[in-house]
Image (cartoon, helix red, strand yellow):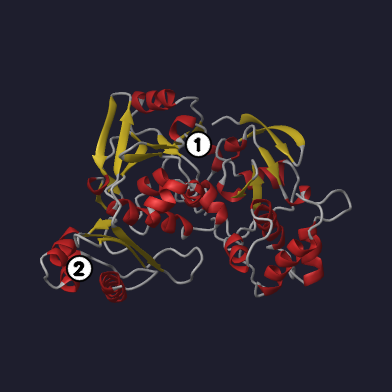
Amino acid sequence: MPKVPIALTVNGQPRAISVWPMARLLDVLREELGMTGTKEGCGEGECGACSILLDGRLANSCLVPAVQADGAEITTIEGVASGEELDRVQQAFVECGGAQCGICTPGMIMAAVSLLRASPQPSEADIRNGLAGNLCRCTGYLRIFEAVASACRAGGRAQ
Amino acid sequence: MRAYIPAYELVRPQTLGEALEHMAAEPGEWQAFAGGTDLMVLLQAGRLEHRRFLSIWGLAELRGTVVSSDSVTLGCLTTYTDVLHDETLRREFPLLAAAAAETGGVATQNRGTLGGNIVNASPAADTPPALLVYDAEVELVSARGSRWLAYREFHTGYKTMQLAPDELLARIRLPRSTAGFRHYYRKVGTRKAQAISKVCFAGLKNTSTGEVRIALGSVAPVPLRCSQTEAAVHESRDPLAALAAEIAPIDDMRSTAAYRLRVAQNLLNEFLHA
């Protein structure tokens, strides 16, 4: 099959590329667009390491064929901070020890950013539910949940 | 091993009519592709045998909910998240909302669709038991026309269904006849979040007439509406024995037949006596 042209906006930047029709958005982001912040864990939608926002909604980029992102607005972990200034969620992960080896961290942060946009004052149960699709093998989750709760208390720059 | 990606085709028809023309021109060649939460997993595992797909994800005609006086009709692209945000569904069809809430994490709920959950035809899918007890109907469309079918007639065996090679499951209709029923849903899995079911149970019980409706997942080759067990309840025979005779659980990587039978009976008991 020939490659097909697609145009999408990634972290505010318009990008036009050609992709194999069934190429995974994850691979296009990492290999074609050079944005390796988005990680691959399981490649089957269980671990959430490849989480991005696709038209504002949390998605596992390993399960999205790139052609379905034609015309879409995508936010990856590289688009969360404002220049040198970390987003409040990122800052809270730093302060609470929410990151250890770091593989799950970009996905955790995208899931947390998505949660806080929909629900600025989430309960503990909301936080656990919002991050249920993201697996971490290091932290035991408590520091991650604490980081998200702390980001809410911090308020700060609205996403 | 991972699939060879360039071998796959994924075209994007602009209208439902265009998609159906593709399917009519080469029946069986083209398979519908919605949010990808099942098909992309197979692709990555190198187990996606079909090669040519029609992306229906962008077809607005297949989205949205239409509420009439006697039914709610859902486009096949209705996502779990759409279900969770729909007040009518949450109020009148809470088992569907419960199933949606227990399917995957948020990212999967944003992309997984009811139509995909049905046509993927996993006996372990979470929404089919709820759809079965609500007497759902499905609309199958093709270039030849449209037909409605009771959902309980749709699955004919393991991964087989009443869907012609040129047909697409376009809509799901739920009769608004749930007033007076108590709703019971319980999914038993390895862990609370995003596990695939060992047993999934949906039950409705009419508190004045005593009518019960019972459906289970992961206990037979198809999601099963348990009419024999319902009859046993209505006729005051032993429902647990009827259930044991009606379901056919198996041993597999997630559980054993014996455990599944025991849990299914325990859930039935809890449902009937709660």
Relative to residue B133, is residue B234 depicted above or below?
Answer: below
Q: x, y (%) of residue B113? A: 45, 45
Q: CA distance from mark 2 to mark 1?
A: 39 Å
| Kind of residue at badge 2 | Leu
- Residue B232 left/right relative to B38: left
| The C terminus of chain B - image quarter | bottom left
Q: x, y (%) of residue B68? A: 35, 36
* Pointer 2 chain: B
Report whether residue A39 is seen.
no
| Residue closest to the eye, B187 or B236 | B236
Residue depicted at 38% across the width and 33% down the height: B29
The residue singled out by tag 2 in the image is B243
| Residue closest to the eye, A104 or B202 | B202
Q: Nearer the viewer, mark 2 or mark 1?
A: 2
Marking on residue B57: 1
* Pointer 1 chain: B
Residue depicted at 11% across the width and 71% down the height: B237
Marking on residue B10: none
Mark 2 crowdedness (10 Å alpha carbons): few <14, some 14-19, many ≥20: many
Say yes or no: labels 2 and 1 on the same chain. yes
